[in-house]
Amino acid sequence: MLVRIDPDSPAPLHAQISAAVRRGIAVGDIAPGERLPGARDLAAALGVNLHTVLRGYQELRAEGLVELRRGRGAQVRPDAAPAVAALRQAVHALVEEARRLGLSAAEVTEMVREAMA
Amino acid sequence: MLVRIDPDSPAPLHAQISAAVRRGIAVGDIAPGERLPGARDLAAALGVNLHTVLRGYQELRAEGLVELRRGRGAQVRPDAAPAVAALRQAVHALVEEARRLGLSAAEVTEMVREAMA
DNA sequence: GACTTGTTCTAGTCCGCATAGAACAGTTAG
DNA sequence: CTAACTGTTCTATGCGGACTAGAACAAGTC
């Protein structure tokens, strides 16, 4: 099973689904151009509602990671490079920790800018 | 005002409050041993319910950052060391990986800015 | 003793999450 | 062309967390 779910997690199911796919792309489990399982199939496999899966997929589309078309399904975009996706994930983790500490966006970008210099 | 709140943020108010204090401790705005504003006062100042502030404070206690005692209020524990150092290290690792991928500083800060939004 | 401050309890409203069912519109396979 | 498949959109419902509200209580301070 490519996508796994923890019903007891505080994270919303749709977020868990998109995160699982994101990670799959990042680590190379899912290749660019590959087709994701149909929303109805995945929903059945996960014991989850169709709309919940669709919502996760649409989040991925909003991020430019996948393409959604009727009849064709969800397809990983060719330019969703694994390395960049991984970096994006690292950024996400960093941002989350920064947010937990209450740092502003300006402060974080400043830290990055400083580190890049 | 030491603690600021954004009512439109998706983040819960109690989490925003604890984050603000956490940040204050992290960057040195709040010294160890210092006393936090009374829950009723802060609630009034923020236009928020007493229980919401208390919940934020109790989260900080659960993390071992502050002590809560009746009559005395909320006090920052002496051993509440700055956690920003760890974050700075994470930033460093991130930047290193980004550089390995050939991304520019602007591209990285943009990714962070986007993720923080 | 009076006052302050956190603690606990009950109760109510509001909103996002998830579910459910149905009809609809491109896409593909036969 | 037809049938099956797939995402899209719509309405509706139940649940739980977040937040508010008021009150009484207990430990500490002055």
Image (cartoon, coloured by chain):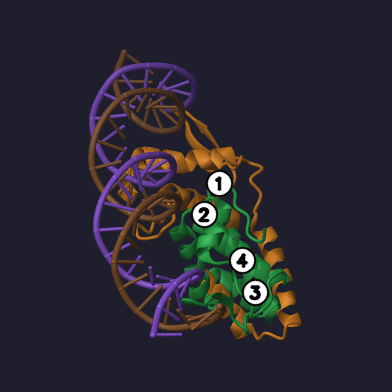
Chain colours: A green, B orange, C brown, D purple
Element on which disc 1 rests: loop
Whole-Å distance between the Cαs marked 2 and 3? 21 Å
Quarter location, residue A85: bottom right
Q: Which chain's residue wears label 2?
A: A
Whole-Å distance between the Cαs marked 4 and 3? 11 Å
Q: Which residue is mark 3?
A: A85
Mark 3 vs mark 1: in front: 1
Element on which disc 4 rests: helix
Q: Does residue B93 lie above or below B86 as drawn?
A: below
Where is residue B32 shown, x and y percent of the image? 60, 45
Element on which disc 2 rests: helix
Circle on res. A7: 1
Where is residue A63 shown, x and y percent of the image? 52, 75
In the rendered image, the quadrant that contains the N terminus of chain B is: bottom left
Between residue A116 and residue D14, name the one nearer to us: D14
Residue drawn at the location 35% of the way across and 39% of the way down? B50
Between residue B9 and residue A110, name the one nearer to us: B9
Judge left or right: residue A20 versus residue B73.
Answer: right
Q: Which chain's residue wears label 3?
A: A
Specify few, some or many for label 2: CA neighbours under 10 Å numbering under 14, 14-19, or 20 or more. many
Judge left or right: residue A101 versus residue B50.
Answer: right
Q: Which chain's residue wears label 4?
A: A
Q: Which residue is mark 2?
A: A13
Mark 2 vs mark 3: in front: 2
- All told, the count of numbered labels is 4
Are callouts 4 and 2 both on one chain? yes
Whole-Å distance between the Cαs marked 4 and 1? 17 Å
Residue type highlighted by circle 4: Val
**Which mark is first along the chain, 2 or 4?**
2
Circle on res. B27: none
Q: Which residue is mark 4?
A: A21
